[in-house]
Image (tube, helix red, strand yellow):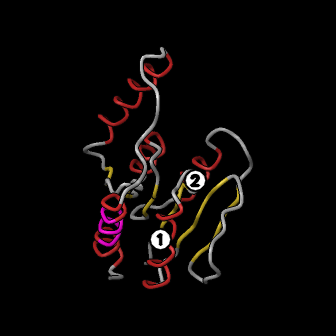
Amino acid sequence: MAITVWVDADACPKVIREILYRAANRLKQPLVLVANHVIPAPSSPWISCRQVPQGFDVADDYIVAQVSARDLVITSDIPLSAEVIEKGAGVISPRGEQLTADNIKPRLNMRDFMDTMRSSGDIGGGPAALGPRDKQAFANALDRYLARNSGAI
């Protein structure tokens, strides 16, 4: 049974989407981009886009409702990651970090702490731009996950 790769596409960097497009076509792997705006994607029988209404967590809620065990979700959203991990799906961030049942709780705690710090004005800014190492780490993590869970590679 083929797994599906779900992409939280609203914030997914274009370079990561391009890696995913190539992998989907090469491996004949279903890829679904979910966003609340139009995401340009190549025409392919393996790649589809789902545009959801505007709203807080609408795309996340759609992914959670659709994802199955062994599917893979590409996101940097920690609460979304926690929900799909509970359903048995895998998660890889655009930086190539695999999130699992073993490491998601500390990530949730750190996210909540950082939200508190940001709201108090103690820190600002966001993550650094993706670099070549991040792109390579993502591609490697994607290949490992797909090889282990779909037999596609």
Residue at the location (46% across, 26% down)? 124
Q: Position of residue 58 (x, y in %)?
A: 65, 45
| Amino acid type at image mark 1 | Leu
Q: Position of residue 150 (x, y in %)?
A: 36, 76
The residue wearing badge 2 is 65
Mark 2 or 1: the one toward you: 1
Q: In the figure, 68 relative to 43: above or below? A: above
Residue at the location (36% across, 82% down)? 152
Residue at the location (32% across, 66% down)? 136
- The part of the chain drawn in magenta is 136-143
Q: Nearer the viewer, residue 90 or 17?
A: 17
Disc 2 is placed on an element classified as helix
Q: Position of residue 95 (x, y in %)?
A: 37, 54
The quadrant of the rendering that contains the C terminus is bottom left
Q: Quadrant of residue 41?
A: bottom right
Q: Nearer the viewer, residue 130 or 89?
A: 130
Residue at the location (57% across, 57% down)? 9
**Image side of residue 91 versus residue 48, left or right:** left
The quadrant of the rendering that contains the N terminus is bottom left
Main SS of the magenta part reads helix
The count of marks equals 2
| Amino acid type at image mark 2 | Ala
The residue wearing badge 1 is 20
Crowd band around label 1 with a 10 angstrom C-alpha radius: few (<14), some (14–19), many (20+): many
Q: In the figure, 92 relative to 47: above or below? A: above
